[in-house]
């Protein structure tokens, strides 16, 4: 029975982490998620730590990304064996990040004889920052509903929040282990006290910063923005005979918003399915809706006799195309097939995988007083890309995300997507407008508060005020400096570990 306690505890930690994220949003559970894992690995071998960390990571990925099966089954037309195999491989790969952290932490802590809080939290955000993921997520993302704590994202981004969660979690775990081992309370409570002290500092900053940004928002000019959520299913979007009907639906839904005087009308990703040539000087008449329109669409460009297709966002005003940006980060399988050029046979194995070309650059789109930084699809959950957009020439005063999450059905994915995207508003102190095909559409103000919100799988039109702030945050200027400092410290730890290992070698002992 004792052998099962560690795996059961690690499973409980994975469950806590899953529940901390949307749709349940039990954020405080994230602070306890690493406790059982730390208790299970702190005195064991590196191999044991690796396996238990892998188990926790795997279970977390299964519970967090189960919705991948909907996409593979319904839209990639894969059978259950292939679907489950790919989900398992993805989760095993994702779990390796936690496994690597656990094994490296135990090994470095033992060889350097340094306290857990000096080793474990920096290693966590170092691994988190470098590990390549299909769907980016961060431990600190569980704090998206904790408005006060989330305000610290404008200092060090998601890395800083992950550092906070990891420090509290490992601190609590270390204190629990010391108390169980008979260490005097005065000494045993120090790790937990250190974690809670950091929590108090971040909360204090959050309270002060939140009040400051609230004052700036109250004094800032606002833009009247309208959002159309068409709720058009994937099959209806892809059927050529329904292009006209779908477009007429968007135009009809837009009319009341235009009548109410919106400065910007936003349609979701690929709302216009009929391909338009890149560089087309004027929009087709049916897209002249009476207000500046930012819409997603498909663009076509001949390339050596073979056309290339792009997932783009067009900004249209009257009879002119004000500009467009192409999606830089394409979705695996849905929009492109990895390694297709290296292994041409893959296309036969995955005939329904997308074949889009990624954009190579982006730009600010301007209409009137609005300078738009556009994030297409899941680009709004990639902090580094959003920061790049925020620092473009002409610096945007409004972030706009065009998304189509209908690929994932009625699952937790749209809630996770919306929750993680809200951090971009805080990191960059810019209002974020999200127009999604089937939900969740809305407006997030620079404090991270959702001021306008739609539902899921409903036809909706939303109208709201978007504050236009011009401040530049530390994160916008410097980026993920906590992660880079942590990685530098990890190099120091490795050096200390190597040096300590040499000192303790048998040859030196004999001499």
Image: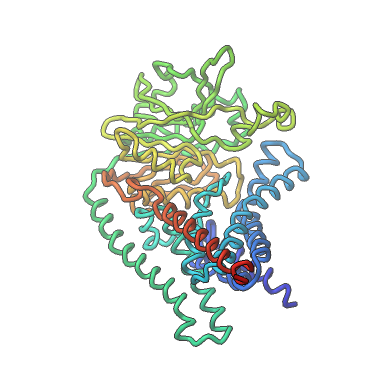
Q: Which residue appears farthest toward the left when viewing the image?
A: 219
Left or right: 459, with 373 as reference point: right
Residue at 73% x, 74% y is 3
Q: Is residue 202 above or below residue 358?
A: below
* Between 448 and 333, the one nearer to me in the picture: 333
Left or right: 148, with 22 as reference point: left
Q: Residue 314's image quarter?
A: top left
Colour basis: rainbow
Rendering coords of residue 172 (x, y %): 50, 74
Left or right: 105, with 325 as reference point: right
Rendering coords of residue 264 (x, y %): 34, 34
- In this rendering, does residue 251 appear at all? no
Q: Which residue appears farthest toward the front when viewing the image?
A: 511
Q: Residue 62's image quarter?
A: bottom right
* Between 266 and 471, the one nearer to me in the picture: 471
* Between 508 and 484, the one nearer to me in the picture: 508
Q: Is residue 263 above or below residue 14?
A: above
Rendering coords of residue 384 (x, y %): 43, 44
Q: Quadrant of the N terminus?
A: bottom right
Q: Is residue 452 above or below residue 190?
A: above
Residue at 50% x, 67% y is 31
Rendering coords of residue 458 (x, y %): 52, 44
Q: Is residue 396 above or below residue 445?
A: above
Residue at 36% x, 58% y is 152
């Amino acid at each position: 029975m004792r052998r099962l306690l560690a795996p059961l505890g690690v499973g409980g930690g994975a469950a806590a982490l899953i529940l901390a994220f949307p749709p349940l949003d039990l954020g405080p559970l994230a602070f306890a998620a690493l406790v059982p894992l730390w208790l299970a690995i702190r005195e064991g071998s590196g191999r044991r730590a690796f396996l238990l960390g892998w188990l926790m990571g795997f279970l977390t990925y299964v519970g967090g990304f189960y919705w991948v099966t909907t996409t593979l089954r319904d839209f990639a037309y894969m059978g259950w064996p292939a679907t489950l195999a790919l989900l398992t491989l993805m989760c095993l790969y994702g779990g390796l990040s936690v496994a690597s952290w656990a094994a490296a932490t135990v090994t470095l802590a033992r060889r350097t004889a340094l306290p857990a809080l000096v080793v474990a939290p920096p290693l966590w955000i170092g691994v988190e920052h470098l590990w390549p993921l299909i769907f980016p997520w961060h431990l600190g993302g569980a704090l998206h509903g904790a408005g006060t704590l989330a305000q610290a994202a404008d200092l060090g981004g998601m890395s800083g929040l992950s550092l906070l969660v990891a420090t509290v979690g490992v601190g609590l775990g270390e204190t629990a282990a010391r108390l169980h081992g008979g260490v005097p309370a005065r000494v045993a409570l120090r790790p937990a006290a250190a974690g809670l002290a950091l929590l108090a500092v971040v909360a204090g900053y959050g309270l002060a910063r939140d009040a400051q940004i609230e004052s700036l928002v109250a004094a800032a000019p606002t833009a009247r923005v309208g959002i159309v959520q068409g709720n058009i299913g994937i099959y209806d979007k892809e059927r050529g005979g329904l292009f006209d009907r779908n477009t007429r639906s968007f135009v009809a839904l837009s009319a009341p918003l235009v009548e109410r005087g919106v400065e910007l009308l936003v349609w979701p990703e690929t709302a216009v399915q009929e391909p338009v040539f890149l560089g087309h000087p004027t929009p087709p008449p049916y897209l002249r809706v009476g207000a500046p329109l930012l819409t997603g669409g498909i663009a076509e460009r001949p390339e050596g006799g073979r056309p290339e297709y792009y997932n783009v966002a067009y900004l249209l005003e009257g009879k002119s195309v004000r500009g467009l940006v192409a999606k830089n980060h394409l979705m695996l399988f849905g929009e492109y097939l990895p390694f297709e050029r290296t292994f041409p046979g893959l296309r036969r194995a995955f005939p329904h995988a997308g074949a889009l070309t990624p954009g190579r650059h982006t730009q600010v789109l301007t209409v009137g007083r609005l300078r738009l930084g556009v994030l297409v699809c899941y680009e709004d959950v990639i902090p580094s890309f959003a920061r790049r957009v925020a620092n473009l020439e002409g610096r945007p005063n409004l972030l706009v995300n065009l998304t189509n999450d209908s690929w994932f059905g009625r699952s937790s994915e749209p809630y996770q997507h919306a929750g993680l995207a809200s951090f971009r508003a805080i990191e960059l102190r810019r209002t974020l407008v999200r127009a999604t095909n089937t939900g969740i559409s809305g407006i997030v103000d620079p404090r991270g508060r959702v001021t306008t919100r739609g539902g899921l799988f409903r036809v909706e039109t939303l109208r709201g005020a978007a504050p236009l702030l011009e401040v530049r945050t530390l994160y916008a200027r410097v980026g993920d400096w906590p992660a880079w400092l942590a990685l530098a410290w990890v190099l120091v730890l490795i050096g200390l570990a190597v040096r300590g290992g040499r000192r303790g070698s048998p040859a030196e002992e004999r001499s």
